[in-house]
Image (cartoon, coloured by chain):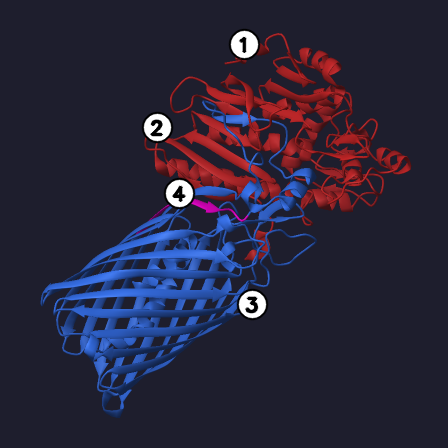
Chain colours: A red, B blue
Amino acid sequence: MAVTSDKLYARMDAVRPDAASGGYYSASFHAMGTACRVIYSANRPAAAEQFRKALLRWLAEFEAQYSRYLEDSLISEINRSAGAGWVDIDEELESMFQLCDWYHWRTDGIFDPSTLPLIKLWDYQAERPVVPDDASIRSAVSLVNWRMVQRERGKVMLPHEGMAIDIGGIGKEYAVDRVMAMAQDRGVRDILIDFGQDLRCYGSPPEGGAWRIGLEHPQDPGKCWTGVSLDDRAVATSGDYHRHFELGGKRYGHILDPRTGYPVNHDGQAVSVIAPTCTEAGILATTAFVLGPFEGLAFLESCHQAEASVWAGKHQTQTGRFSRYVL
Amino acid sequence: MTVLNNEAMRGRRGVLRSCPHALLLAFILHFAQLQRAKAEDRLDFKFYHYREDDDRIRVISPAFLYETEISPTIFLKLDGVYDAISGATPTGAPPVPKSNGQTKTESGHHATTGASGTVTSPAQHTKALSLPFSELTVPTIEVEDERLAGRIELIKKLNRHVLSGQLSYSNERDYDSIGFAVKNSTHFNNKNTTLLAGIAYSHDVIDLVPGPGTDNKDVVDMLVGVTQILGPKTLLSANVAVGYMAGYLDDPYKVVEINRVLVAERRPGHKHKEAVRLSLNHRVVPLDGTLESSYRFYDDSYGITGHTAALAWYQDIGDNVIVRPMVRLHDQSAAKFYAVRFSGSPTEYSSDYRLSALNAISYGAKLIIAPSARLSIDCAYERYALDGKDDVTHEDVYPSADIFSVGARLWL
């Protein structure tokens, strides 16, 4: 019984048919350490219930298998085997690793799933975070490089003890895309998927038109500075205005630059990216945030089908066609 | 049905998950009354409305009971209840500062995108720990569910014995329960003494949404009791109940925060409990009234020890009207594995406020009118309030509720 329960971060609270909107359902739950919500249409309550169960089951299994926080997850097994040997992986992880390959190359190494030694070193979860010494940072950086991860079809090996991977930089967004695929396979015509404010939508909301997504104001969290109108698009935001700590008068954000081993340190506050998939939106947003406002915007301009907004200091800039989405 | 009402006060999930078995126990606890079963058919109808303040949980429960005489010594009872539950309930996640920590939706937006902030950051966490309750808000989720429960019971009078067997079934969206109970009461001493013994078993199947498959819970309850007529105006009864449950005992809708990550709660895989209940009823002839008093001691392997005292006064007004004011006080200690937040690697953990150290008070009144010999109708109001004792659990998690009921009993 409870053997499995501790693996399940996700919990369903309700499917709430909205009589006024007819045929739309909403499921809210906790998953992957954050608040999630899915709003979708269905022809009948039974179909809505089937989809709800299917997506929650998939999420629970996904998290059980790929969370680095769970001792018996596949990711934990890979990390425990660092420097020791190969570990068999399943097709889902193989698929995610292929995405990692692509985005590691596309971002010139800024997106790197092997950054976990650095993340652990900085330990933002600590009650009183501390700044690691330079030697420790250099040592951790030497263990970070996705290209060092050895891969063969269906198996993986971390060649050096101390190496560790974490798909946290892609997992939530990847889950959004997988749930979207599940929805489309089941003929769901209208859906908004919101996993911790990483979103993807398709079709229309109950009142028609396009889904309207607010963009949080980094200087006034909890309020939006504008909204965008989306259909068949995803949007994700990267920034450190929520998660940071200050020590000795210096501010340390939670987003690390794997090239230096230190937190990003510039006046960038938030990058929001609209892209065809949530995985792409999330990775591009984080990459641009790491690169900094100027270089990040230039990088985003080079990304096909992606549009973005960048906040730096008190100023907001955006890619050329971002405004076509603005409400 | 009285037990249903009490369970309802424990909170919405308490209603759903406890009722099938509570209904079995309700029968046992009221078993002595069965000996008064009349040789007439009877139909009861009740309608309960449980409503917590601040748009929290609401439960609407119509219920019926039909009792008929099959032969002079065999009786059949059927009853059913439907619960419609909706409203907000605490998730178990720790309170967060009112200004952030929740997904905000600006007017007109279906959702909001922003930097990762819904995972508690160290700064937020420290802030949340240092803020007074008034600046924190308790995370809640909207829930909606329905439950349908039914029971069939056969009662056989056999000399000094009254034997009974019962089957029950309860269903909700992700929960099925089937149970049975058997009991026997025997009277002695020129019917001045009645001994009662009963056992109830239920098997529950929980659909582990979103987990893989289903899980089970098995519950066994046993009760022995004695009812003694102390005089023409006084009745004393004492019951001892023990219970054991094993299997999936978590509330699948509750989370806890461990090392700042939200995970599903995890309770021990088994629990045993003991309860002793004493009650004394005394008719006060000069006042045309009856005093009903009771005390219940409860203890379980979770570490919860509870004391419940209740007083009710049945005041006759003429021949056809009874007014019954009541008050009930409850006090309990916390479960060993209860905390608002956890750190390290705990093996059992829950932040369900119902497992915290708390006080509860209920008070209210009931009006019973019997316009004819074959009909009685009643209506009742009860105010129920929970209050935490540990100064750590946020006060807003504890609900206060109004409970309304109307009912009718028809002798056919």
Q: Residue B40: name its quadrant.
A: bottom left
What amino acid is at disc 1? Arg
Residue toward you, B245 or B139:
B139
Mark 1 neighbour class, 10 Å CA radius: few under 14, some 14 to 19, many 20 or more: few
Kind of element beneath mark 2: loop
Q: Which residue is mark 3?
A: B303
Q: Which residue is mark 2?
A: A21
Q: Which residue is mark 1?
A: A324
C-beta proximity under 8 Å, tags 4 and 3: no
What amino acid is at disc 2? Ser
3 vs 1, front mark: 3
Q: Residue furthest top?
A: A320
What amino acid is at disc 4? Asp
Mark 3 neighbour class, 10 Å CA radius: few under 14, some 14 to 19, many 20 or more: some
> Is residue B168 shown above or below A313?
below
In this picture, which residue range is highlighted in magenta? B83-92
Numbered label attached to residue B55: 4
